[in-house]
Image (tube, rainbow, N blue to C red):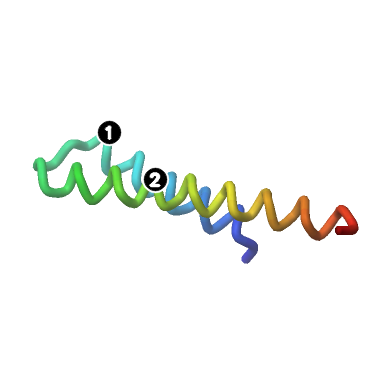
């Protein structure tokens, strides 16, 4: 699995929990997971770009 799919998975899991809004505690964790997902997606895009372009 590449970074982008891992990021999308983490973001999806986070948003799934966000839409549920179980308790305030879970809400914070879900937000955190969703943002980690976003960060991993961005990292994956940067790495893809770096692989495609010669430095």
Q: Secondary structure at mark 1?
A: helix
Count the labels in the image. Answer: 2
x and y percent of residue 39 in the render?
Answer: 49, 49
Q: Residues within 10 Å of mark 1 (few under 14, many from 20)?
A: few
Q: Which mark is residue 35?
A: 2
Spot the residue most to the top. Answer: 19
Q: What is the quadrant of residue 55 in the picture?
A: bottom right
x and y percent of residue 31 in the render?
Answer: 29, 43
Q: What is the quadrant of residue 34 in the picture?
A: top left
x and y percent of residue 25 in the render?
Answer: 11, 48
Q: Earlier in the sequence, mark 2 or mark 1?
A: 1
Spot the residue most to the front. Answer: 55
Name the residue at 68% across, 51% down.
Answer: 46
Spot the residue most to the right. Answer: 54
In the displayed structure image, the side of residue 14 where residue 24 appears, left or right = left
Name the residue at 30% across, 49% down.
Answer: 32
Name the residue at 13% across, 41% down.
Answer: 22
Q: Residues within 10 Å of mark 2 (few under 14, many from 20)?
A: some
Q: Secondary structure at mark 2?
A: helix
In the displayed structure image, the side of residue 55 where residue 32 appears, left or right = left
Query: What residue is disc 1 on?
Result: 19
In the displayed structure image, the side of residue 26 where residue 49 appears, left or right = right
Q: Nearer the viewer, residue 53 or 15?
A: 53
Q: Nearer the viewer, residue 20 or 48?
A: 48
Question: Label 2 vs label 1: CA separation?
Answer: 15 Å
């Amino acid at each position: 699995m590449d970074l982008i799919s891992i990021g999308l998975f983490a973001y999806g899991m986070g948003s799934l929990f966000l839409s549920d809004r179980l308790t305030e505690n879970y809400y914070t964790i879900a937000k955190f997971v969703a943002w980690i997902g976003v960060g991993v997606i961005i990292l994956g895009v940067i790495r893809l770009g770096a692989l495609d372009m010669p430095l």
